[in-house]
Image: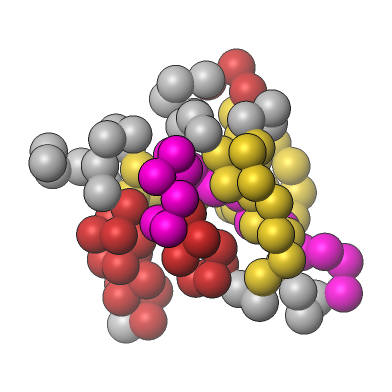
Amino acid sequence: MRITSCTFHSDHVLLGHVMDKADVDDEFECQLKCIANNSCKSFNVRSDGNNSNHVCELNNKTRQMKPDDFKWLKGSTYYGSVEASYNFLVCFKNLYLNLLSQ
C-alpha cells in the first residue's frame, strides 16, 4: 500500500460512473458501503431534499481517472482517495477521526 491522502470536495460530484445507489443516514454509512464493495473507488453523497436522508452513489472510477466527469453540483460532496488502489478503510477512517476531532 502506498501512502496517499483522502480527499473530499463539497459541491462536487463525479458523473457517469455510479455503479450502485442507496439511501443512507449520513456520509459515514455511504463510506461503509463503499468499503464493502471491492469495485468502489470513490463516492458521492447528496441530500435527498428532506435533510434527514442522503443519497449515496458508489463510483467505479475516481476524479483522477476521469477528470472531465468531475463537476460542480451544489449540495453534493465527492469523497475519494488520491490513488484508486489505496485502501478506503484506512483512508476514510482517518478522515472520519479528523472530522470528529474538530
Whether 46 is drawn above or below 50: the answer is: above
The residue range painted magenta reads 35-50
x, y percentage for residue 36?
43, 58
Figure coloring: secondary structure
Q: In terms of depth relative to the viewer, which is nearer, 48 or 100?
A: 48
Give the number of callouts.
Answer: 0
Q: Is residue 22 left or right of residue 50?
A: left
Residue under the image location 37 percent in, 81 percent down: 100
Is residue 47 shown in magenta?
A: yes
* In the rendered image, the vertical position of residue 42 relative to residue 100, given as above or below: above
Give residue 75's quadrant in the image: bottom right
Q: Please, is residue 80 above or below residue 67 in the view?
A: below
In the image, residue 21 above or below residue 65: below
Residue 73 sits in quarter: top right
Q: Give yes or no for residue 10 being in the magenta stretch.
A: no
In this view, the residue in front, 21 or 81, is: 21
x 26%, y 49%: residue: 87
Residue at x 54%, y 71% (from the top left corner): 29
Image spot of residue 21 (x, y percent): 69, 51
- Image quarter (top left, top right, bottom left or bottom right) of the C terminus: bottom left
Please report the residue visible at 60 percent of the width from the left and 17 percent of the height from the top: 68
37 or 26: nearer the viewer: 37
- Residue 60 in sight here: yes
Compared across the picture, whether 62 is left or right of 54 comes to: left
Camera sees residue 80: no
Q: Is residue 61 left or right of residue 20?
A: left
Q: Is residue 90 left or right of residue 14?
A: left
Q: Residue 45 at what x, y percent from top left?
A: 64, 56
Q: Quadrant of the N terminus?
A: top left
Q: Residue furthest right?
A: 49
